[in-house]
Amino acid sequence: MKFLATLLTLAASASAIDLYLHTDNNCGGSNALCCNGINPNTCCGTTANGSPYQSVAVRGIQQGWNIQCRGYDNGQCNRLQTISGNNGGNFICNRSNGFRYSGVGYNFIGRKRAIDSTLKPECSKKRLDNFCLPE
Ligand SMILES: *[C@@H]1O[C@H](CO)[C@@H](O)[C@H](O)[C@H]1NC(C)=O
């Protein structure tokens, strides 16, 4: 049982990727929308018209993970706008340079594989909006 508990703890902490929608163009500013500890292929977003989000970020990427961040507009994760890789880093930020993001998601990609823009949008499941936990 102790082993199982340890395993569950590891599994929980290993999936602690946080997705953010930021009100400025550089993954900062106040009033970010975020989804903490979100699973891959899940949309973190808002249906609000005229959303204020100009950049999307992924934080808490573990070493050795190779993921893609996908940024969307047109409400929740309806229209794919940007795809970004982490290139071995623990953080991804992408800017809209104009449009407003309404949703963000991520997915794992194979090691050493180029970003594939033909992948289907991953947002099969949607998650309710919530607000940032203090860091
Ligand atoms: C942001 O998204 C665009 C469009 O998908 C992509 O070409 C660019 O490389 C991304 N920027 C970063 C920093 O990943």
Image: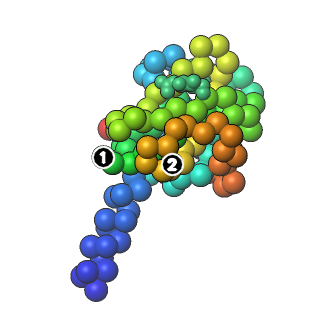
User: Is residue 100 shown above or below 44?
Assistant: above
Percent position of residue 113, x then y: 49, 43
Residue 75 in view, yes or no? no
Kindly identify which residue carries mark 1: 63
- Colour logic: rainbow
Ligand 1 found in image quarter = top right
Left or right of 47 on screen, residue 32: left
Residue 86 in view, yes or no? yes
The answer to which of 134 and 59 lies nearer the viewer is 59
The answer to which of 66 and 125 lies nearer the viewer is 66
Q: Quadrant of residue 74?
A: top right
Which three-letter amino acid code belongs to the residue tagged 1? Gln
Q: How many marks?
A: 2
Near mark 2 (Cα within 10 A), the count class, few <14, some 14-19 or many ≥20, is some
Q: Quadrant of residue 58?
A: top left
Percent position of residue 86, x then y: 42, 36
User: Is residue 88 shown above or below 2?
Assistant: above
Task: Give the SS element for disc 1.
Answer: loop
Near mark 1 (Cα within 10 A), the count class, few <14, some 14-19 or many ≥20, is few
Percent position of residue 25, x then y: 51, 16
Q: Quadrant of residue 8?
A: bottom left
Disc sitting over residue 90 in the figure: none
Residue at 60 percent across and 39 percent down: it is 116
Q: Nearer the viewer, mark 1 or mark 2?
A: 2
Left or right of 52 on screen, residue 113: left
Residue at 51 percent across and 55 percent down: it is 39
Q: Can you say which quadrant of the picture contains the N terminus?
A: bottom left
Left or right of 50 on screen, residue 70: left
The answer to which of 27 and 135 lies nearer the viewer is 27
Kindly identify which residue carries mark 2: 109
Task: Give the SS element for disc 2.
Answer: loop
